[in-house]
Amino acid sequence: MRWSTGGRAGPPVVLRTGRAVACQNVRGTIPPIAPPPERAGAASSLASRFSTIPSPLRHYSPVGLGGQCTGAECFLLRPVDPRRGNRRILYDVNNRGNKLALWTFNDGERSNDPRTLAHAGDGFLLREGYSLLWSGWNGEVVEDGQQRLLAGLPVATKNGETITGPAHLEIVTTEKVFSRAFSWSPWGISDAFPAGSGKGMFNYRFRMSTEYGTYHEGMLSGSEFFPLAPVPQTDPVTGETGETLARARAAQHVPRMMFVQSSTEYWNRAASLLHTDAQGKTDLELPPEVRVYLVAGAQHLGTGPHTRGICQQPRNILDDRGPILRALLVALDRWVSDGAEPPLSRYPRIDDGTLVSLETFRRQFPSIAGVNLPEAYYQPARLDFGPRFHTEGIAEVIPPTMGPRYRTLVPAVDADGNDLAGIRLPEVAVPLGTFTGWNLRAAPFGAGGKLSRLDGMYLPFARTRPQRQQPGDPRPAVDERYPTRADYLARITEAALRTTRRLRPRTANAASS
């Protein structure tokens, strides 16, 4: 890849972290590729049209190559001393122009201009020697003073005229989805940490690339469509057959992939369809290149404030992202680089009773005063956008015709309401409360009682038996579970050690841990 240094934010900055690891940020742009001679006229037309776009995009000069034109901003964070590097680039697919890797893996303060120790967080990625690379790719992102990464994309034309047509779009303020569309599409293959069973709208005309469906919002986005799982299967409703890795297998380049899901993804992103049939009746056996992990009790974006926001109950405080993703990144690196088997998949299954229907879940969840239970959850419909949608990315039926829904399932819970399956962090295995991946909207914010899009909740236990009996809480109180502080500390320490062992790359001696 060619790129030129420089850009909006001035000279490089040296970021020094703990244990004297110094990193330097380098900004630049990926210049457009020169067109072949037969495309030069069209490229000139596109460039002149693009030059009218307001600053700062106007300094790009996109040109055409096979109908695709682009120029993009880049940001590289690398060790100042190359000897401290591990000779690996961690490419972080930015979320709407935002750089999230330091926040995700290092628990750092979120910033699109990382310069301080607060931005570096605990320094994990930098101490490990990774060079971090971001590049603009999302044409929906515009300059807003937040240092988002920009991509200069041209206006699509045909015969010299701007291409127009009908579109369906629900505009909401929401959070990220990075899905499997790149490995699904004919244009490439990639490792991924996807959300739910959906695919991004990256190669579909007039679509927002990060649009996706949930129970209450975006249901007509079309982000979930067959095939939904990385193994061959047949949709009994439509008769379609396929798997999401079919093109990668045909190209003889199947990436090693980890699907890391929070509990929210099962409630609001149809995650069960990754590993069940389309009717939600049987488990699918995952291929050796794929691992699936449920982080039990986690909400979509990890720990948040213990406030209600738009919800009926205080939101989830489980701090799962950093600890889980640091361990799994090391395992993924070892898997790709050295062939070391990563941790076994940990997710709920039909055959062991840990993946269940809503009716079963409602019977399992404890009856807690003031806590309402979901009456429905996301079960995506089979949508028909017309015959050209999946072959050419062109929707001709707007809005789409709705067909039968896929059947999705949710994690079973124990007597406390905590998920039974998946990676159970010490806070869930030795709990002081109930962690969920779902929460219900409060009436003052509209759609009261419906699932909130990406929020979970945390319901702490009463401290004493009399305190829990007064409101009628069936969950044992803290002093009933842990007679002494020393007892609690011993049990949570053992749980932490057990979780650590299970998240390490597997060896012959550790294969059964």
Image (spheres, rainbow, N blue to C red):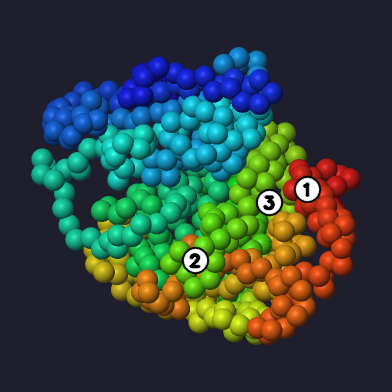
Q: Which residue is located at x 70 percent, y 71 percent? A: 461
Q: Is residue 70 visible?
A: yes
Q: In terms of image quadrants, where is residue 396?
A: bottom left
Q: CA distance from mark 1 to mark 3?
A: 23 Å
Q: Secondary structure at mark 3?
A: loop
What's the residue type where badge 3 is placed?
A: Pro
Badge 1 element: helix
Instruction: Using the image as rendered, state which of residue 137 and residue 418 is in the foreground.
Output: 418
Give whichever of discs 1 and 3 has the lower sequence position.
Answer: 3
Q: Nearer the viewer, mark 2 or mark 3?
A: 2
Instruction: For label 1, count other residues whose C-alpha is less than 10 Å away and answer few (under 14), some (14-19) or many (20+).
Output: some
In the image, residue 63 above or below residue 434: above
The part of the image, by quadrant, that contains residue 22 is top right
Which three-letter amino acid code belongs to the residue tagged 2? Answer: Arg
Q: Quarter of the image holding residue 477? A: bottom right
Q: Position of residue 183 (x, y in %)?
A: 49, 47
Relative depth, front residue between 237 and 334 = 334
Crowding around mark 3 (Cα neighbors within 10 Å: few <14, some 14 to 19, many 20+) is few
Residue 500: which numbered mark, if any?
A: 1
The residue at which mark 3 appears reads as 288
Provide residue 397's location: percent of width, then percent of height: 25, 67
Horizontally, residue 175 falls left or right of residue 438, namely: left
- Disc 2/disc 3 C-alpha distance (Å): 41 Å
Earlier-in-chain disc, 2 versus 1: 2
Mark 1 residue type: Thr
What residue does disc 2 label? 308
